[in-house]
Amino acid sequence: MYRVYWTDDTNTPQGIYTSTLNGALRITEEKRRAGCTFVTMVSEDPNSIGKPGVDSVEDGVLPNGELYTWKKRR
């Protein structure tokens, strides 16, 4: 599921759903060529489950038992 948002010539926000990435890209291009502003598209990953990111790290171990080894490099 994809949603395309844009602002029309009266500065009114608009949006439309489409089920395919190709459809979303086509609509986005059409709106930009038509002179609409703030044209963008969004989607949710249908394969995502649970909350994104790490819930908790205790003693360097993730909830699923894997080691948490990520380090911020400066």
Image (tube, rainbow, N blue to C red):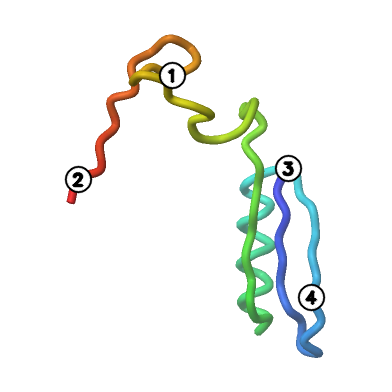
Q: Name the residue under label 3.
A: 1
Give amino acid for label 3. Met
Circle 2: element type: loop
Relative depth, front residue between 3 and 34: 3
Residue 21, numbered circle: none
**Residue picked out by circle 2:** 73
Residue type at tag 1: Leu
Task: Report the residue marked by disc 1.
Answer: 62
Q: Is there a contact, CB below 8 Å, between mark 4 and mark 2?
A: no
Q: Give residue 4's position: percent from left, percent from top.
A: 71, 60
Q: How crowded is mark 2: few (under 14 residues within 10 Å), some or many (20 or more)?
A: few
What amino acid is found at the position of numbered circle 2 in the picture? Arg
* View extreme (bottom): residue: 10
Packing grade of label 3 (10 A; few <14, some 14-19, many >=20) is few
Residue 13: % across, % down? 79, 75
The numbered mark, 1 or 4, whose residue comes first in the sequence reads 4
Foreground residue among 1 and 30: 1
Q: Residue at 33% of width from left, 16% of height from top?
A: 67
Rounded to the nearest angstrom, the CA distance separating label 2 from label 1 is 20 Å
- The mark nearer the N terminus, 4 or 2, is 4
Counting residues from the N terminus, which is met first, the one under dot 2 or under dot 3?
Answer: 3
Tag of residue 13: 4
